[in-house]
Image (cartoon, rainbow, N blue to C red):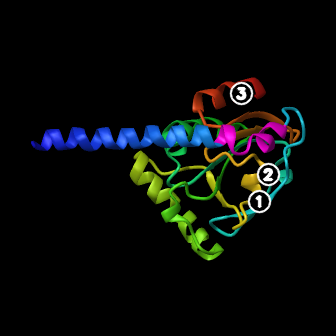
């Protein structure tokens, strides 16, 4: 087989793998945990949390009142999350000086062979997220990366959706939620909230 043929075959397998990843995320997010996700009501107070970023700085959602917060969930093996990195970077650059904070909560890996066994390992894996994602997407993440605990408390509180995205308005209320991050949808909501 020619090099071109092998390259096309590799690309097809990669795309097929991503497609399967999207189907798994959509299936798991629509059937496995619908009650938790559905119970989060638009215009109700967003569930508060405190998590540390990769520089060991604590972030409490309630401390960010007065700002719009884009909260997304993901990991280095969550392909729908990876695919939206470039568009989200564009939004981060466009809106961060307009009072919008972008936070990524590092959650469980979707590839279970990559799971961390303890918090230290999870924290180290989260540190590498920017580099892993950079290798996969061609760009490094610009959002702050927060690390959830080993019990996935924040992830579960927000409905256990591996590539979910939530927008919290300046009053701390949930303005938008989606089971799969889509930068175009995020931008539409940000424009209405500005």
**Mark 1: few, some, or many residues within 10 Å (few <14, many ≥20)?**
few
Residue hosting label 2: 157
> In the picture provided, is 80 more to the left or to the right than 138?
right
- How far apart marks 1 and 3 lie (CA) works out to 26 Å
Which of the marked residues, 1 or 3, is nearer the chain's N terminus? 1
Depth check: 17 or 54 in front? 17
On-image quarter of the N terminus: top left
**Mark 2: few, some, or many residues within 10 Å (few <14, many ≥20)?**
some
| Residue 22: assigned label | none
Which element type, helix, strand or loop, lies under badge 1? helix
* Magenta stretch holds residue 173: no
Predominant secondary structure, magenta span: helix
Q: Residue at x 44, y 41 (%)?
A: 18
Residue 143 makes an appearance in the image: yes
Depth check: 23 or 142 in front? 23
Which of the marked residues, 2 or 3, is nearer the chain's N terminus? 2
Residue hosting label 3: 189
Contact? badges 2 and 1 (CB < 8 Å): yes
Contact? badges 1 and 3 (CB < 8 Å): no
On-image quarter of the C terminus: top right
Mark 1 vs mark 3, foreground winner is: 1
Q: Position of residue 5 (x, y in %)?
A: 16, 39
Q: Which residue is drawn at 86% across and 51% down?
A: 62
Residue hosting label 1: 153
Q: Which residue is drawn at 80% across and 41% down?
A: 35
Depth check: 166 or 144 in front? 166
């Amino acid at each position: 087989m020619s090099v071109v043929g092998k390259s096309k075959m590799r690309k097809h397998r990669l795309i097929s793998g991503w497609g399967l990843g999207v189907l798994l995320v959509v299936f798991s997010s629509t059937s496995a945990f619908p009650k938790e996700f559905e119970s989060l009501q638009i215009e109700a107070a967003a569930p508060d949390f405190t998590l540390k970023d990769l520089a060991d700085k604590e972030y409490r959602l309630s401390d960010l009142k007065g700002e719009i917060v884009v909260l997304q969930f993901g990991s280095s093996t969550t392909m729908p999350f990876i695919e939206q990195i470039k568009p989200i970077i564009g939004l981060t650059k466009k809106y961060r000086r307009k009072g919008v904070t972008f936070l990524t909560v590092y959650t469980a890996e979707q590839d279970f062979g990559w799971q961390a066994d303890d918090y230290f390992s999870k924290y180290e894996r989260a540190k590498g997220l920017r580099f892993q994602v950079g290798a996969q997407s061609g760009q490094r993440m610009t959002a702050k990366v927060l690390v959830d605990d080993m019990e996935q408390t924040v992830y579960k509180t927000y409905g256990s959706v591996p590539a979910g995205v939530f927008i919290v308005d300046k009053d701390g209320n949930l303005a938008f939620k989606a089971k799969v991050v889509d930068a175009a949808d995020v931008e539409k909501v940000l424009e209405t909230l500005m």
